Amino acid sequence: MGSYREQYRRSIEDPEGFWLEAARDVTWTKAPTRALDASNPPFYRWFPDGELNTCFNALDRHVEGGRAEQVALAYDSPVTASKRRYTFRELRDEVARFAGVLHALGVTAGDRVVIYMPMIPEAAVAMLACARIGAVHSVVFGGFAPNELALRIDDAAPKVVLSASCGIEPSRVVEYKPMLDEAIRLSTHKPERCVIVQRPEAGAVLGERDLDWAEAMASAQPVDCVPVKATDPLYVLYTSGTTGKPKGVVRDNGGHAVALRWSMTNIFGTGPGEAYWAASDVGWVVGHSYIVYAPLITGCTTILYEGKPVGTPDAGAFWRVISENSVASLFTAPTAFRAIKRADPKGEFARNTDLSCMKHLFLAGERLDPETYQWASDLLQIPVLDNWWQTETGWPVNANPIGIEPMPIKPGSSTLPVPGFHIRVVDDQGNDAPAGQDGSIVIKLPLPPGALPTLWQDDDRYVSSYLSYLPGHYLTGDGGHFDDDGYLYVMGRTDDVINVAGHRLSTGAMEEVIAAHPDVAECAVIGVHDEMKGQVPRAFVVLKAGVGTDPAVIAQQLVQMVRDRIGAVAALRRVDVVAGLPKTRSGKILRKTMRGIADGRDEPVPSTIESPDVLDSLRPVLTAAAD
Ligand code: COA
Ligand code: AMP
């Protein structure tokens, strides 16, 4: 394993030399002379004396460097039957003008801008325009409800919010503007202005605070890139933790640009001029890193796809987009492949499309089950590469380093630690678990460039959430094991986070919503296995004594409350009203035991259980289908 081993060893033993060398692939206004600033542990910073502009690296340098007429962004929207292509020059000009709109609204370096948008080109333009003037964007996924948006507005305190009149889901038009208005009504912090893209599928009524995107653009003056410190924040992306308060993951400018550029060559085997498609959403980290920043910084054509892999108009939509755009690499979540497989089990659409352009399929966002791996691999006859990471890390932590040295694929494993990430699997005492034995997956500090330096204005929560489990280590929240060859198998979360169709959600947040119902005494929400979405939530509720309302009516109210408070994306469909919840003698609800039984595992029952009969009476409910 020569070359990969050598690179990995060097990244751990000489991070300074390793990352300064990688930094040469980024254009700096002031090149860094140092890589790691370890003067204030556990807060590590990368390239402390470097200065650059991320938007310049994504757009201007390609315009100046000979790629001006290459397509930078191809928008494909089967849900609106439209397509649009932007060359690097066109995208640079569009972004420079929108940066002018923001500038005219008084947005300056360090100000926050919340972006609540569907998958339209303006979402990428908005992100890059913020980067251009040094403003900090915070994109909120469109499937979240007003309450979730309000939480993020209050935490990020944006000067301006950017949104659209509506998003288009395959089954319906979702009006975003009323949700934005409601979020601003709920929030304590009020943004000064909102800029709204009006879409023909459903126009929005604009109020005093609002500006029409097209009108603002018509009179805007382009502005140039503002150099920022490598350590200045580029964005804040909120992600689910164990409670209802999301965590604001901070991404810096310099480390992020260096890490993403490095990852495209070494992890994704993709180079300038190639078409790269991450079929995700800009509201998630995959969208930030691999729809917008990494492909553009690398000089690739990126695809921005508005639709789902099925029903838009058919299970062949993905293959059409790949073929029409000569996509070399597709990156998506396993759930998308399970959806395609369900609609087209023999893969006939793929077989009838010329996919000779395709070199690799990358899958991430949730565990890649061996069956889905095999189906995709047999169908496409190209390497199908699992990679494991999370919002916090910003780029793959464990992957097949195909650009360095392709490694044999083992289904069920995302292969080997990525250079820069010193991964350990530890037992309850913090000792290395032997090969084959599951434990908690931790990463030795410092995390490499691109990973979060802290949480937005909350160093204490950063330390308590991630760094307190094992001194000198970052806790990933995932469990799994290494095998004898050092391959990592990530088996699932060890906390209250679940992954529904590749979307990260908090069962704790759902419990908070359910517990607020006046008739609920206590509740537990767990993630259970689902054929297509990987996991879906299920709720178990104990009602207060003497409640006269039909339990089925309450269950329905609770489903609606979660949808209203968290969003449709929470996908809670089934609530069971039960007589009691199994607990330990100290009163802790046995969620892990419940999860195991629901998933059909032979889950050991802890000896500390208080009333085993409560669990026994719950067994048939737990093993019933989720829908
Ligand atoms: N805006 C508004 N509503 C949204 C939304 C958005 N951006 N995204 C999802 N929703 C809604 C959906 O319309 C759906 O509502 P419904 O309950 O009224 O039907 C609900 O949220 C759940 O959506 P989803 O989880 O996406 O389920 P689905 O059945 O519509 O589609 C898949 C399932 C697997 C096809 C789809 O999730 C998918 O393609 N996922 C893989 C790619 C991906 O996005 N990965 C993310 C991380 S890499
Ligand atoms: P997110 O922060 O939304 O990217 O979700 C991160 C979580 O998704 C991780 O902590 C894992 O639980 C899960 N995850 C992502 N990729 C993989 C993978 N390749 N294999 C297993 N789990 C994954």
Image (tube, rainbow, N blue to C red):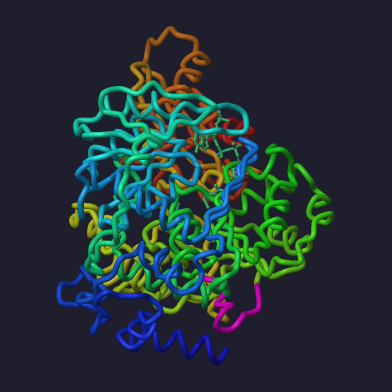
**Would you say residue 613 is visible in this rendering?**
no
Q: Quick one: quadrant of the N terminus? A: bottom right
Q: Is residue 460 visible?
A: yes
Give percent across and percent down for residue 179.
38, 27
**Residue nearest the viewer, comparing 582 with 157:** 157
Left or right of 555 in this view: 355: right
Name the foreground residue: 243 vs 350.
Answer: 350
Q: Residue at x 62, y 54 (%)?
A: 334
Residue 457 percent coordinates (x, y): 19, 52
Tell me the magenta residue range.
Answer: 399-409
Indicate whether 59 appears above or below 338: below
Q: Is residue 247 magenta?
A: no
Give the tally of numbered discs: 0
Residue sitting nearer the eye, 40 or 591? 40
Instruction: Please give the name of the residue rendered at 23% of the width and 37% of the height, measured from the top-left corner.
Output: 154
Q: Is residue 400 magenta?
A: yes
In the image, residue 54 above or below residue 365? below
In the picture, measured across the screen, residue 208 lies left or right of residue 276, that is left
User: Where ligand 1 lies, by quadrant?
Assistant: top right
Task: Locate residue 422, reporting x and y percent.
Answer: 39, 77
> Magenta region's main secondary structure?
loop
Give the residue displayed 72% in from the left and 59% down from the top: 376
Residue at image coords 53%, 71%: 399
Which of 462 and 154 lies nearest the eye of the viewer?
A: 154
